[in-house]
Amino acid sequence: MIGLTDLEAAVLAKIAREGSVTSYGIAKEFSESMSEFWSGSAGAIYPATRRLVQRGLIVATSPDNGGHTRTEYQLSREGRRAMKGWLLDVERASGLGFDPLRSRLVNLELVTENERQKFLAAVEERVAAAARAEPGTDNPQLRAIHESVMKSRLGWIKTVRSILGSI
Amino acid sequence: MIGLTDLEAAVLAKIAREGSVTSYGIAKEFSESMSEFWSGSAGAIYPATRRLVQRGLIVATSPDNGGHTRTEYQLSREGRRAMKGWLLDVERASGLGFDPLRSRLVNLELVTENERQKFLAAVEERVAAAARAEPGTDNPQLRAIHESVMKSRLGWIKTVRSILGSI
DNA sequence: ACCCACATGTAATGGGTTACATGATTTA
DNA sequence: TAAATCATGTAACCCATTACATGTGGGT
């Protein structure tokens, strides 16, 4: 009834979006696109789906399409409820999480002006490149959200550069 | 020589900024301001400083200011080098990390229009409130960075609302 | 025949979390 | 003198990571 880890919640959401998926399918999406924060390793996903089954949040079905083992998961009613509880959690959604750039920026006064400038320029270039990269999804909503993330991030970096440039 | 965890790096940076600190002092700052991503628990900080000492990245000194035990840490030369290596790591700095809001937004199509709108309005309000809150530091650079984070975040949320509003 | 994608798992490890335990010093 | 703060640590637990092990099915 209590806490889902963020990975568990993401798994629930993935199952909700797809309807029916295997652990392998979940792991694959996590490792190639999802968040780059999770590796999408088997050692995380298989235990996670097992936990979710034990808690009754998802149900397992084993369609026998010839020979090999394959287990697909679907959301249960409680699973949907839990997923929505996590998704609409305003308190947690309003936090900052972990941002590898932010955690560096707040310490950037520890290096020289020159290093700062070079670093920020390089990061800006890299983020701009990532923003131009192909989106990896054809869902227009997701694409728009992804685009807004990258745009806002670029704008933020520019702001920070001007702040730190004027020391 | 290889990887620092982000927490270890943050500890190094804190020591670099302060010059000399106790584990307790580090834990305190982490738990009240730092990142809200780390709890700043003793169970994380004391083992971390121990590891950093073992790797020669910080050195321990025990000033005897009467009676009670107290261990302060300072950066070693290698510690400064490791910290700078982490700080100026463009590759890692350019990633997205974990954002509790982003990880929800990409799944927001799973709830009704009404729930979406209510959720986004509530989050916007809460983030705006956090942006107005007192900064917790008197360092003008840090304040400016924090301000830029919150401003960019608010702008982003507004963009997302207009994207998701026009479905 | 060989390789790649699909598919499922386990084992060792690492590094966080909460909760607990202890004691000195300062402040009300 | 009671409470808060400073200060250090440990123990049990959880969960994600990497690396390994195993096997099927389809394409070249």
Image: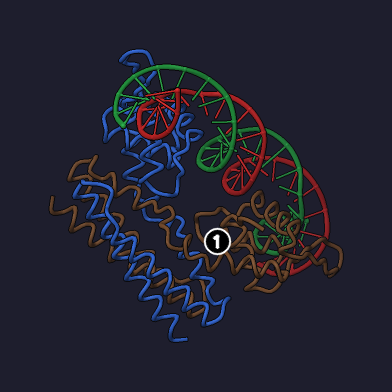
Chain colours: A blue, B brown, C red, D green
* Residue C20 occupies quadrant: top right
* Number of numbered discs on residues: 1
* Residue pictured at 48% horizontal, 65% vertical: B90
Q: Nearer the viewer, residue A153 or B17?
A: A153
Q: Secondary structure at mark 1?
A: helix
Q: Position of residue B106 (x, y in %)?
A: 29, 47
Q: Position of residue B41 (x, y in %)?
A: 62, 52
Q: Which residue is labeled 1 in the image?
A: B32
A135, above or below B107, in the image: below
* Residue A50 occupies quadrant: top left
Q: Nearer the viewer, residue B108 or C7?
A: C7
Q: Nearer the viewer, residue D7 or B51?
A: B51
* Residue pictured at 60% horizontal, 61% vertical: B9
D9, above or below A42, in the image: below
Q: How would you rate the neighbour count of disc 1 (Cα within 10 Å): few for under 14, some for 14-19, many for 20 or more?
A: few
* Residue pictured at 48% horizontal, 80% vertical: B140
Pinpoint the chain carrying mark 1: B
Quadrant assignment for the N terminus of chain B: bottom right
**Residue at far bottom of view:** A166
